[in-house]
Amino acid sequence: MTDSNSLARTFNNLPISRKILAITFVSSFLTLFLLCSLSFLRERESYFEKKMSSLDTLARILESNTIAALRFDDKHIAKQYVDTFQLESDIESVCIFTEEGDVFAHYSRTPGGPPSIFPASLGEFREGNRIFYATDVASNGSLLGKIVIEINTDSLKAATWKLLWTNVLFFIGGLAITSALASRLQKVITSPINELVDVTRNIASEHRFDAKAVKRYNDEIGSLADSVNNMLETIRIRDESLRRINVNLEQTVEKRTRDLNERNKSLRKAIDAAQAAAKAKSVFLATTSHELRTPLNPIIGYVDRLLEKSNDLESTHELEIIKQSAELLLRLIDDILDFTRVERGDIRLQKKVINLQKCCSDVVYLMREEAKSKQLDLEFKFELPDGYSPDQAVMFESDEVRLKQVVFNLIGNAIKFTHKGKITISTQIQGIENDSGKLCIRVEDTGIGISENDINKLFKPFSQVDSGLNRQYSGMGLGLAISRSFVEAMGGVINCSSIEGKGSVFWFEIPIVLKGQVEQTQTLIQSFNHRVAATDSQSVLLVDDERVNRELGASMIRSLGFHVVCAKDGFEALDLSGKHDFGLILMDIRMPRLDGFSTAEAIRDRQKKEPPTPIIALSAHITRQDEERCQKVGINDYLQKPLKIQVLNEFLKKWLVVQPS
């Protein structure tokens, strides 16, 4: 390809005269080569056919003369006939075979030469460099024998070389004549062009636009000369106009430059104001959402505690309404926070190795109660890849938090818009090749469904399929838009299919790389009333500056079977952690005087035991900067407020080593 491009550039840079010669030479070369080649092949084939026709005639004559000899077994007469072929200089040998394949009569120009081989077929055939011609000897339809004539190829070769040299001479002569004619006649085209080039070169060097090109013929070159003359006249008129305009041009440019600078200043101010407003909006939403989540923590927590203790059906129903309303408000706040991240382009994936079965177990476990409250069946289907046994976990790398949130949103929507029936969550890994594949998760419901015209609205922010649904089902229409942003950030796609009145199927798929198999230490779906047993010697240090949060957290931890000690700020936490060896520290990161980050860093600096005590960050809102700082100061994980008893139970099981009693 490089040589071809280089040759093309070389040809394009040649003068026109040489291009004409080159084109003529190549065209003549190809044409004459084809003609001479066809002539050579045709004449050689004709000569060969004539030779074979002559041999066929001789063979037929010999056949008619030797029928009687073969019939009466007269080898002497047959020998006389075959010896007559010595007069044919091209014939190397002649052999007559009986019907059984025995040699009956043989002639060879070379004394003592072996007889020809018995032919397998009639007509022309070749054996190495030798050419043979075979025919039958028959009488009244009865086969008497075969005749084989071997041809001397010297005459064929001589004729071939003669034909070849004749065509080569014709080819060279024709090529020389066409090249000479092209060399002489190309001047008819190139001379006017060269004159035109000289004129334009002089105009370019001397800037004399009053010069004129000479028109010799009424052809394309003559038209080009007319065009050049018209262009020169246009340039002359334009120059006169430019000289007149140039008088006021500088003043006009200066005035417009001043105007443009003023506009740029105004535009920069507007951009700065818009950016400041956007930043202020994001900060305001994040701060407001954080402040709203803080009082929701005790509301939801204490409602859960009251529901566990309440035996009054009417009170239980009222508490359920309070809990559902608080959780709805919490979900709206979460959507606002996530949407501000998406709007700022602040989606940064935190990848880690995930146990797929455990991840699905957590989601189904947390959503089952919500489905149960609407008397809906929540069915989970998990399809293992080929080669995986049921007791082995599927491990892959992804952002577990974002993945769970997408599934939470899809299941939450399905529960919201389904009044009866069931919701089915299906998980499978497709297209595995070299440990790479796609994780596909489907959420199918038997809800109200969506019309085909409204499906396109689903993944747009602040959009639901009908304004009436906003009033009936609440919500701001952010969940699916946020889910799409998270899925696309993970390199996947998300979509929906639905039949109005019958239900919907939401699905998404993301590319994954499998990290091998490990034996599972727990069943796929855990018991939903499970509590961890603990000994009295285990204890948890809970650090929070809000008294209500401390009391609620301590109550929840005790209900799970653990001993808990509370600290109201970072200084008290440092004092208690220095006196006691806690199994786990739950640390609020936003506290006055000494915040959770500084407290955790101080604990890590003075702690000597191995392994170190796990520290879990508590916050109503964890930002990306918070996650980075947690890793820097040695905080192992983070837990978001408001605390839920199921999630807290999972964290305690994960980080607090339970000693057998």
Image: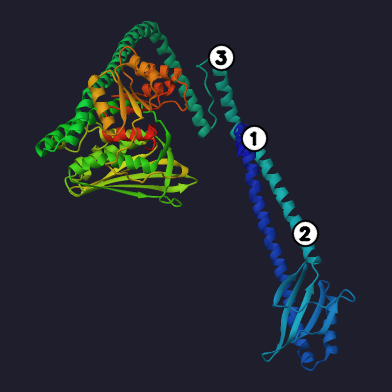
The C terminus sits in image quarter: top left
Which residue type carries mark 3?
Glu
Q: Is residue 436 above or below residue 261?
A: below
Please report the residue visible at 24 percent of the width from the left and 19 percent of the height from the top.
Answer: 547
Q: Is residue 401 left or right of residue 109?
A: left
Q: Is residue 254 left or right of residue 326?
A: right
Of residue 384 and residue 99, the one placed in the foreground of this image is 384
Please report the residue visible at 36 percent of the width from the left and 30 percent of the height from the top.
Answer: 538
Image-quadrant location for residue 314: top left
Please report the residue visible at 65 percent of the width from the left and 54 percent of the height from the top.
Answer: 35
**Rendered image coloring scheme:** rainbow
Please report the residue visible at 13 percent of the width from the left and 37 percent of the height from the top.
Answer: 316
| Whether residue 355 can be seen here | yes
The N terminus sits in image quarter: top right
What residue sits right under mark 2 in the picture? 162
> Which numbered disc flags the more N-terminal residue, 2 or 3?
2
> Which numbered disc flags the more N-terminal residue, 1 or 2?
1
> Which numbered disc flags the more N-terminal residue, 1 or 3?
1
Task: Say what secondary structure mark 3 lies in.
Answer: helix
What residue sits right under mark 1 in the picture? 18
Residue found at the far bottom of this picture:
72
Which residue type carries mark 2?
Lys
